[in-house]
Amino acid sequence: MDINGNSGGEKLKVLHVSPEMAPLSKVGGLADVVYSLPRALRFMGVDARVVTPAYDGVFDKVRDLGWDLSNTRKLLRVSLNWEVFTARVWRASSGDHVIYLIEQEELFSDKSIYRENLDLKGLLPFAFLSLASLELTRIVPFNPHVIHLHDWGTSMTCIAMKWHPYFRRFAGDLRSVFTIHNLAHQGLLPADHLQPIGLHEAFHINGVEFYGMANLVKGAIIGSDAITTVSPTYSHEIQGPDAGMGLDGLIRSHSWKLKGILNGLDTDYWNPSTDPAIEINFDVSSLEQREKFRSLFVKDAGLDESQGPVIGSVGRLYPQKGMDILIPAIRPLIHEGFRFIFLGSGDPYFQGELDQLAREFPGRIRVTLGYDESLAHRIYGSSDMFVMPSLFEPCGLSQLIALRYGAVPIARKTGGLADTITDVHANPEGYGYLFSDYSSHSLIRTCLRALDDFKDPSRWRDIIEKGMKKDFSWKNSALEYVKLYKDITGLKGHSSDSSN
């Protein structure tokens, strides 16, 4: 009997397709989802696997992690841009977690994964991954019921299943789920790029045509059997003009197959009681240890030893993340006693503004440009508060990590932030602070609300404990995906036997 109370039946098999997967390749939160969601599904008896590119250095990472790695001796061949590209298929596994790695040196040599301009050369790696994922189901002993596609980079899979002269024959009983992680990225490209990748038949008003351009996400919305977003609130927001990015009307017309499922957190990896990046581990029952670590790290970070709270920020420095309202708020908040620690990179203007503030207020703000995984863990584990004033936030993982590590979130009430944070002053069970108006004034006022509570040690500890006790693991979200897979495949139950 499986975790859903079903016995017998055919085993549900799902293939996740993604251009990135932590810890092998990572640009953003998508990589974390593609690693942890299939693992959670396998725990529930679903044979969930991943196919992703073998960028330069990925094999070394697999070996360093101690995963099993083997050459399947299978070759994938896909015709693109008037030539045939051939790739080798490798199989990596960690426990029962199976990943197919596609080795194609010409297409997957760029570690940055995403390019600034989506010209034909930049499109080909995504087109190959999208089409090769279908060919993979033919050459390896794994025949999925569902192919689960993540964001625009894999959208061409379900477009091909509907309009490609060759790959549409793969549709058959195979069902597709397309997850929108961030609708701001839609895969917009000139229409003449479609012919070289065999998707020219999709260029029409009921396909990918979008104001004279080709819009890959539009095609995936139309061509998929189900659409998901990474939080319930975001699924509603993208049906309106503010967050719909020009596709709100189309999304409303396909709302019957749209579902918002909150991203979960890998609670084994993000665990302050065992995290090797933290010199002094702690949990909700040993907050004194957290305070010791906080004091140690604040000193190491070069912040002064005043009594004010430390606000942490880990992430990209772009307008979407609210940097244009956060940076003007820093000076007045420093004058109120706050200290800041930033880790991230992005817009050169925002980077320059933060550098200037660090020079202006030594000991009050530390800025580290770039990304350092160990430092990120230490910031989560030492900050009193964690700020996320996002213009929009499809889900957000940072607030979930912050809560687990005892950093109280201050966030704008949008997308997944609205779904995962309950305001302290709106609900006696609250464990964070929310504001709605997108302005520096609202952010400052919300920080000052938090400061008032911070000055009461007993109340502040209670707020921290409430947040740390919240369960944002993948368990409930994975159950929702299992139900969705069953609904679109017609499988009523599935065997919990594992086969590789």
Image (cartoon, helix red, strand yellow):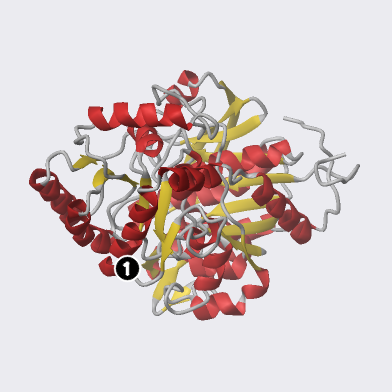
x, y percentage for residue 134?
Answer: 61, 49
Q: Quadrant of the N terminus?
A: top right
Q: Quadrant of the C terminus?
A: top right
In which quarter of the view is residue 166 placed? Answer: bottom right
Number of marks in the rendered image = 1
Residue 376 visible, this orientation: yes
**Quick check: 124 left or right of 359?**
right
Q: Of 260 and 496, which appears nearest the observer?
A: 260
As drawn, which residue projects farthest toward the right? 8
x, y percentage for residue 88?
Answer: 52, 32
Q: Is residue 470 above or below residue 231?
A: above
The disc labelled 1 sits on which kind of residue? Answer: Ser
What residue do we see at 68% from left, 53% from top? 481
**Quick check: 349 left or right of 158?**
left
Q: Is residue 383 above or below residue 428?
A: above
x, y percentage for residue 46?
Answer: 74, 41
In which quarter of the view is residue 100 placed? Answer: top right
**Quick check: 187 left or right of 132?**
left
Question: Circle 1 is placed at which residue position?
Answer: 442
Q: Of 14 and 160, which appears nearest the observer?
A: 14
Q: Of 26 and 322, which appears nearest the observer?
A: 322
Asked which secondary structure carries label 1, the reply is helix
Residue 200 visible, this orientation: no
